[in-house]
Image: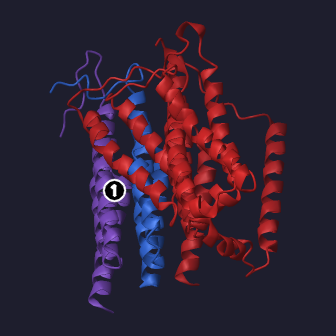
Chain colours: A purple, B red, C blue
Amino acid sequence: MSVADILTVLLVSVGLVFFLAGSVGLLRFPDFHSRLHALTKADNLGLGLIALGVAFQVAEPFGIVKLVLVWFLAVLAAASVAQLIARSALDRLPDGKEADKRG
Amino acid sequence: MSAAFLLDAGLCLLILAAALLAMAGRDLFGAIAFFIVYGIMIALAWVRLEAVDVALAEAAIGAGLTGVLLIGAWAMLNRLGVPEDHKPAAGWLRLVAGSASGAITIILVAAVMALPAGREGLAPMVAEELADHGVSNPVTGVLLDFRAYDTLMESIVLVVALVAVWALTPPAVWGGVPGLRQHTRPDGVLAMFGRLLPPIGLVVGVYLVWAGSSQPGGAFQAGTVLAAVWLLVVMAGIHDEPPVSSRLLRTVLVAGPALFLAIGIAGLGVGALLAYPAEYAYALILLIEFTLTFSIAATLALLVAGRVRRAP
Amino acid sequence: MTAFLLLAALFLLATIALGFLRVHRGPSRADRIASAQLVGTGGVAVTLLLSAASGNGAIIDVGLVLALLAAFAAVAFVKSTAADGAGDPEEDEGP
């Protein structure tokens, strides 16, 4: 087991823990907006750790560039979409004010 | 019980679960969400089957573009106030559909199980011939060289489908702009997303078609990525759809198939329809793929944008 | 190493399956589409692991395309929730 292999196993394992946390949070949290927290933060951190872990197994440098790009795109997409879905899911009172102003 | 077997078994279970849950759901939107999920799972299955070109196409079309199309259609039905039909279908209809699906499944399983193990099919023959034909990705070689006729027909069929959609235009807005007028908050998240993602998507799309000659990729996959990126630009309100009467648009739409056809007919001079002279094969294939990519991108984007709704 | 990566992918499939439950239960449409997004992110992670397990770098391209296009259905959904089907959920807000 080389150093690269040990690092891969470590990083991927921690990434899996975060993915599990994200999915469990998705199932257990009481309302939509808290579920969105679990979704966007935990999952994308897990993806980043897995991408980092896999990077130690990749032979050519272009592969590492692609891995960084994949993670960057996933985070960008998740962040933007989370904002948009969260806004659209806020309840609105008839006079246009928002009903839920917490956090 | 190797790790690979467990993984494949788990994937099969998830694919079946996604399909069943898509049908078992109570409402249409849940079915659409599961259809997108199903597309992602199938893309993973293609990866496990070592068909990476197909996985790319499935990820782009099945999980990406079809999702946008279905949600757009669902949203349109909602806006028109069409009530959802929750009545289950008639008993006899369900029986016929179930038996037909079951029969086809049994036939497919029997056919796959009956395949002789270890035989490689046409792969050795393709590998032999590939050296004279410019590209080193066997899938691209088959699509654009050995079976170029099929690909040519497919690209023409796409344009015909688009013409059919345009034929639904009401006379008052003939030649006008497809889709609704999109508006967004100029400093908001959607506008920023629509500015950041498209350049990256453009680079990825060009990379996919360029790499398609030697590794998985190709015109359809790249074209779909570019179409999706254009749709995002429109959805984010950065730019409006062009009117369908625009000459530039129509040129882009037919340029791919037309160039393909022209090169094919010119191939008659070298021996047969769609034959490429050996020393130019790589250049010709790359030329066809690039032009086809942009035509496919425009066609798919306009197919998803839908019917013409606004005057030019 | 290959076995570890494939088992890690299997574990990810199990967490994706948990996401299926949320897509099925809802209760709101936003829940469903956001959970479909989770399946997409999980799928990207699975492709990364599969690419390392088989040594085939082209599989990362599948993850790239999935990551790129995963958000589009959600954006289409969000636009459809606006009053005229073509707006932005942030447009009615103050700065």
Of residues C3 and C30, the one nearer the viewer is C3
Decide if residue B232 is on the left or right side of residue B87: left
Residue C69's spot in the image, x, y percent?
A: 42, 48
- Residue occupying the far left of the picture: C95
Residue B63 visible from this viewpoint: no
Q: Which picture quadrant has residue A82?
A: top left
Name the image quarter holding the N terminus of chain A.
Answer: bottom left
- Going by the numbered disc 1, the residue's amino acid type is Gly
Residue B276's spot in the image, x, y percent?
A: 65, 57
Q: What is the chain identity of the residue bearing mark 1?
A: A
Q: Which residue is drawn at 68% across and 53% down?
A: B148
Decide if residue B197 is on the left or right side of residue C55: left
Of residues C91 and B126, the one nearer the viewer is B126
State the residue position of label 1. A25
- Residue occupying the far top of the picture: B172
Q: Which picture quadrant has residue A50?
A: bottom left
Q: Which residue is drawn at 67% across and 47% down?
A: B266
Residue B193 visible from this viewpoint: yes
Of residues B227 and C7, the one nearer the viewer is B227
Q: Which picture quadrant has residue B4?
A: bottom right
Decide if residue B231 is on the left or right side of residue B70: left
Task: Please state the total of marks drawn on the protein image.
Answer: 1
Name the image quarter holding the C terminus of chain A.
Answer: top left
Q: Which residue is drawn at 54% across and 18% down?
A: B81
- Residue occupying the far bottom of the picture: A1
Residue B227's spot in the image, x, y percent?
A: 47, 40
Q: What element carries label 1?
A: helix
